[in-house]
Image: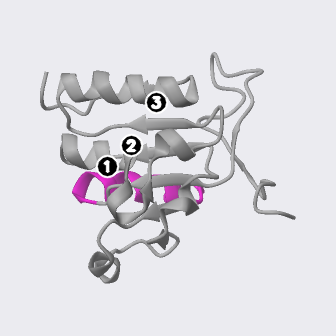
Amino acid sequence: MTKHEPSSTLAFGSASDAGLAGRRPVLGEIGFVGLGHMGMAMAANLISAGRRVIAYIRRPDQIAGLEAPSLRTTTDFSDLLDCKVVISMLPDDNAVREIVCGRKDIGLGGLAAGLMPGAIHLSMSTISTAAAVQLASEQWTRLRSCTGIRESGRC
């Protein structure tokens, strides 16, 4: 089996759930960026539901403090690029911009340039409306798809 072949099926709900019959499940690992209080709780819930989660750690000194036994951590951003779903839960516009657009000065490619076609970036970050519009446009230009749910906070 190659790393591009799914080893298990991930589904949000079951096929018997109303409105989900006939939909294809999400396959593979779920990528995650932003393991603060809220992000860690969300990743832990995904793991508890039997999902495989790989989390990009922006600050390697934080790895030791993570408390989720089945969480796979990485400091290599490219490990997220094979995920069909990547969730980000970041604190501000600049952090999200860095993850979506990348930073050439440190060799970090962004989700907009690196995710496979059809992948979903689910941004649940606390960002301004202007940043959300700009980043959605950037992702749409490169991926031809964009999904975002604003975390409560700014309007």
Q: Quadrant of residue 130?
A: top left
Mark 3 secondary-structure assignment: helix
Q: In the image, what residue occupies the spot 60% across and 35% down? A: 13
Q: What's under tag 1, amino acid-wise?
A: Glu
Q: Is residue 84 above or below residue 65?
A: above
CB under 8 Å between discs 2 and 1: yes
Considering depth in this image, is 88 or 10 the residue closer to the camera?
88
Considering depth in this image, is 96 or 37 the residue closer to the camera?
96
Magenta region, residue range: 36-52
What residue is pinned by disc 1? 98
Chain-order first, disc 3 or disc 2:
2
Left of 43 or right of it: where is 14?
right
Q: What's under tag 2, amino acid-wise?
A: Cys
CB under 8 Å between discs 1 and 3: no
Q: Specify the label residue 139 is tagged with.
A: 3
Point out residue 117 in the picture as x, y percentages from the top left corner.
66, 34
For the rendered model, the colour scheme is one colour
Chain-order first, disc 1 or disc 3:
1
Q: In the image, what residue occupies the spot 77% across and 54% down? A: 6
Q: How far is the residue under mark 3 from the one under mark 2? A: 8 Å
Left of 1 or right of it: where is 140?
left
Q: Specify the label residue 107 is tagged with.
A: none
Magenta segment includes 70: no
Point out residue 17 in the picture as x, y percentages from the top left corner.
64, 25
What residue is pinned by disc 2? 101
Q: Quadrant of residue 148?
A: top left
Point out residue 125 in the picture as x, y percentages from the top left corner.
27, 40
Q: How far is the residue under mark 2 from the one under mark 1? A: 5 Å
Left of 43 or right of it: where is 51?
right
